[in-house]
Amino acid sequence: MNEKPKIAIFKFTGCAGCQLEFLHLEEIFLDLLELFDISYWVMVKRDNDETGWDISLVEGGISTPEEIEEIKQIRMKTKFLVAFGDCAIGGCIPSIRNWTPQLDAESQVYRDTSVIQSTKVFGIGEYVKVDAILKGCPAHRDTIVELLKSALLEIRPRLRQHPVCVECKFRDNVCLITSKKMACMGPVTSAGCGAICPSLGRECEGCFGPMSNPNASALASIFKDLGFNEKDIKRKFRKYAGMSPEFRKEAGH
Amino acid sequence: MGEINIDVNYLARVEGRGALHVRIAKDGKIKDLKFRIYEPPRFFESFLIGRRYDELMELTSRICGICPVAHQITALRAVENALGVEPSQQTKDLRKLLAISAHIQSNVLSMYFLSLPDLMGYESIIPMTKDHLHIVKRGLKLKKLGNDITDLIGGRAVHPVTAVVNGFTALPSKNKLQVIRKRLKEAKQDAYDTVDLFSEIEIPDFKRKCEHMAISDPKEYAINRGRFKSTEGLNVDEMNYRNYISEEQKSYSTALHSHVKNRDSFMVGPLPRVNINFNQLSSDAKDTAKRSGVKFPNFNPFVSHLARAIELVHNIDESIEIIDRVPLKRERDEITCKSGFGAAITEAPRGSLYHSYELDNNGIVRKADIVPPTAHNALNVERDINEFVKTILDLPLDEITLKCEMLIRAYDPCISCSTH
């Protein structure tokens, strides 16, 4: 490669946590600057180059008419477009409101809803073609590095498709469902975090979204057998990825 | 002098999406001034209704990726106030350590990454690596220290997981805390160097006396609990917050603007904290503040950077104190649901943060009310710019624009939070 690849980091409807996760690569931050030209990053830079990028990391879901136009423009100027974190993939936590009528949500917060430009929140893939996804709320910094390394080597990144359960096995964790009767989302949730929560005495809440081809209805019936009611189970699935085809049925109407 | 139009359509080096528009007539009168926050609303207060009390720390954490810890602790405390739960001293101590670690991370980010490039004449920290590598490295090192502590206590730096209602799901190991303690000791010099840097660097000479507010506690430098106090005599229990603070919608902003009822805008953040709680700072932090030559209480918003640096010294001292006294006993009690109202105010890195919830008998949220620091500050930012811009009108437009941006960045706005 003659020139350093140009990277852009964009924020849409979200919390900036994934950008922060990028910034938390303190140990290799200076190395990254050697290897890449971060040419657009409004949270960090005042002079931003909008001519085009090799890799665009897009954080946040799409929830306004302006954002729909912007993501289309970004797609046109980007070679490799990454949905950076759960919000960009499928709306994440803010998508919980998609089950509330839009006007109800708006009038709960604003007296004058006529000036509020807002739609239901979706992932960027709803509007443009996406080349890769980095799962997680936030996306894990190791997966960011894996993706960037692969881009330099021009190979396919190794991103995990298996459930959190595999990571629990690696860490010798006791199963929270079978031993503690906790409603753990691990069996249907994508690995990538290193089983943080089950390793720290807490059930997986599913913040990496669905694994590849999960059996959500089987897990829902296990939760039911453990004594959780229908509303509890809906809340479990209607959280980080309620809009996903994998969890849509269990997330309820 | 002709008309002056200041337009910044996407404010750089702040979190989230905001703009600034100022119209100044030929005679120097300000015709229009808007700190326009156009961050898309996510309607947290709407979709939290129907969720369970024990999910609130996890859900509200997602309001903000820079200050998730502040939202978590505020949500937890509001729920505990609703349920009538008083956590143990160990839980309070570990929460304080968690909150302080987030302050270290966020305030270092604000000082070194978001504002220092302005003060040193760079577009960002990236070109500074060529000329001032040691400063950049110091910033990265301090920020990493904050993150590593959050990671150790909370399990993850962004959206940590272990803090729950009335306790923690897991405790850090003693050995790992001792490693952190050593690093905190070593970081003290970096914190002093940060104070020196920000006391020597030139900032605009601007002062506007306005009401400063922060939570306050006579026994400690208040971060997670205290009475809501102001420099104009306000002294409020967190449960009564809504009797004193109102919010108003502006047609051009998705963040609501706060003001004191029957009074004006107010400022929250590191400068109000240092102004109001100077006596509770650690002795080294007080000494370094005195050595800086800047007098407190201070009403120049640009002194916020120095206030962050002074807090950094304090935060390192208090972290070590907590590590030295926390027993790390296993403890966790069951919680019983009951209906009720609970409110809490904490100090997020960028200022006072309010959460309140109404819970039903099953612990399900019936009403939620959240006011982040930047919603508290939004109107005050406009009031400040209104005064400040008049003092710099003889400069070229691009410099006026930069200076106004710098004033906004001194507040370290967190715009996603403010809209939520």
Image (tube, rainbow, N blue to C red):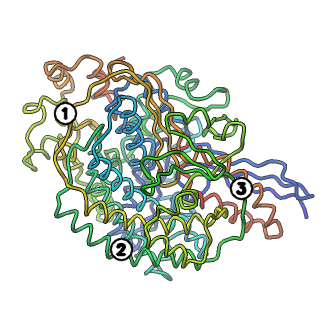
How far apart in space, not on screen, are marks 2 and 3 (Cα)?
A: 34 Å
Q: Which residue is drawn at 19% across and 53% down?
A: B328
Give the amino acid at mark 1.
Cys
- Marks 2/1: CA distance? 39 Å
Residue B330 % position (x, y): 16, 46
Which residue lies at the image location 44% right of the left edge and 54% below the top edge? A56
Q: Is residue A212 left or right of residue A31?
A: left
Q: Do the residues labelled 1 and 3 touch (CB within 8 Å)?
A: no
Q: The residue under label 2 is which amino acid type? A: Ala
Chain ID at mark 3: B
Amino acid carrying label 3: it is Asp
Residue under pointer 1: A184
Q: Is residue B185 visible?
A: yes
The residue shown at (61%, 67%) is: B296
Q: Do the residues at discs 2 and 1 belong to one chain?
A: no
The answer to whether tags 1 and 3 share a subunit is: no
Label 2 belongs to which residue?
B187
Chain where mark 2 sits: B
Looking at the image, which residue is at 49% across and 69% down? B309
Q: Position of residue A245 (x, y in %)?
A: 31, 28
Specify the farthest residue to the front. B218
Q: Position of residue B146 (x, y in %)?
A: 36, 62
Hey, which quadrant is residue B183 in on the image? bottom left
Task: Look at the picture and state if B268 lies above or below A118.
Answer: below
